[in-house]
Amino acid sequence: MFLNSLSGRFLILTAAFVMLAEVLIFVPSVAQFREDYLLSRLERAQIASLVLLADDMIDPDLEQELLLNAEVFNVVLRRDEARELMLSSPVPGPVAGSYDLRDASGVTLMKDAVLRLLHPDNDVIRVIGNPVQEGGLVIEVTMESAPLRAAMLDYGSRILWLSAIISILTGLLLYLAVQALMVRPIRKVVDNMAGYAQAPEDARKIIAPGSSIKELREAEEALHHLQEQLSSSLKQKERLAALGGAVARISHDLRNILTTAQLFADRVEMSEDPGVQKAVPKLMGSISRAVNLCESTLAFGRAEEPAPRLTRVLLADVVADVVESERLAAGEHDISYGEDVPAGMSVRADSEQLYRVLRNLVRNARQAIQSTGKPGEIMVSGLETHEEWTIRVVDTGPGLPKRAQDLLFQPFAAGGRKGGTGLGLAIAAELIRGHGGRLELERTGPEGTVFAIHLPRGLETLADPMPRQEAAQ
């Protein structure tokens, strides 16, 4: 569980990054240590050679002691353009390599240090450098490589242990800082969200922004605004639900009353009184419309649309079914239908729900044209882009009145057709929202009306990156 927490991962990453940084500086550090080690041996050898300069003849035992103290086999000093062997002792083997420290670059020093660490053999090496205090032109010594490698390994291990300790301490400090500055404020927000979810109607559960961190305060303010809106919406929905239940009961009782009135009206229709005969059709029409409104209200209150079952649907097939059904419903009216859908165009939708939406739009267009008593045309077109599919239903009807446009997609707000309940477009818009899309009125007027369905493509891709056909405008 610790590794799955934000602070735990932060601790591990910090330690890892610090160790990585230390490893990156490990090679230069070891190279510098190696150079300092060799320079110190040159300095010791030069000091030992000063004894010989002071006295040309020294005891062999003293010479061996001086070389042992300097940890070298012999010392060569170049002075006054002459190369002179100052101190010497038996060399155990041939010289395996020479290293000139006078003009060595950083890359060369690092390469030599790495090679020495990787080479465990005890070789005899020659080291060349500049004497200190201008004690000559060049100084050379021969020495064993094993003590140098052992010192480098000891130094490197101390660096690694120190790096590990620094990494752990740094990670721990950052862990505590993250706990105090991030984890606790985030946990406070999470706890508030959990508490609010248990009782969203309780205003005390709404978070009060108080973080001093800019980003967290912005998150708290956004959450505060969201909770206020959600609480308000829940209260409004509760009131609407109660009102809807009351309306449903009233509609049920009213439908029963109207059904009884309709039975009596049927009997009155058999009367031979001319006045009664004249009034009965109007009475029957009014009662039928009232019964239809009650039934629509009850049906809408009970409606629970299932989530769409999204599959790939050939749009041309759905449009053809809709147009064929509307042609039969139009009867003798002079209405022509057009289809402008690419043959291979498929959309990701619920075929049954998409059919219902298109059928509603085309039926509304047909009824609007029929209300004028004039010929008309209805066109259904399809267009696809990288972002979405667009389906348009275009008619040459009289257009929607201003009141109908203001109340479009609102239930029971019929204003475009006499006797309508205003539920068709509301349900159609709800179905399209269930697809993640939107249904909108693009334009309307004396020249006709255009409704557009926009369905998002989501993760879908197009074989052809360009739209294959422009929709009819």
Image: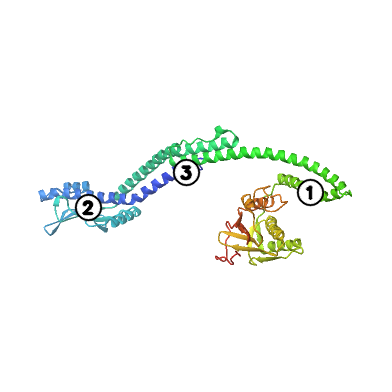
Q: Amino acid at mark 3?
A: Arg
State left or right for residue 305 relative to residue 273: left
- Proximity of marks 1 and 2: CB atoms separated by less than 8 Å: no
Please name the amino acid that badge 1 sits on: Ser
Give the Cα separation between the discs numbered 1 and 3: 70 Å
Q: Residue 185: where, in percent of width, then height?
A: 47, 37
440, 405: nearer the viewer: 405
Residue 181 position within the rendered picture, expressed as x and y whole percent measured from the top left: 44, 38
Mark 1 or 3: in front is 1
Give the answer, above or below, for where 340 lies relative to 403. Answer: below
What label sits on residue 288 in the rendered view?
Answer: 1
**Rendered image quadrant of residue 249:** top right
Residue type at numbered disc 2:
Phe
Q: CA distance from mark 3 to mark 2?
A: 54 Å
Q: Does label 1 or label 2 sit earlier along the sequence?
A: 2
Q: CB atoms at circles 1 and 3 under 8 Å apart?
A: no
- The residue nearer to you, when weighing 98 against 244, is 244
Q: Which mark is residue 132?
A: none
Q: Earlier in the sequence, mark 3 or mark 2?
A: 3
Q: Give the residue at mark 3.
A: 9
401 or 431: nearer the viewer: 401
Q: Is residue 252 above or below residue 425?
A: above
Q: Position of residue 207 (x, y in %)?
A: 52, 36
**Local crowd size for mark 3, using a 10 Å CA cut-off: few (<14), some (14–19), many (≥20):** some
- Distance from disc 1 to disc 2, alpha carbons, whole Å, reads 122 Å
Residue closer to the observer: 309 or 452: 452
Which SS class for mark 1? helix
* The disc label shown at residue 73, or none: 2
Q: Residue furthest left?
A: 55
> Which of the two discs, 1 and 2, sits closer to the camera?
1
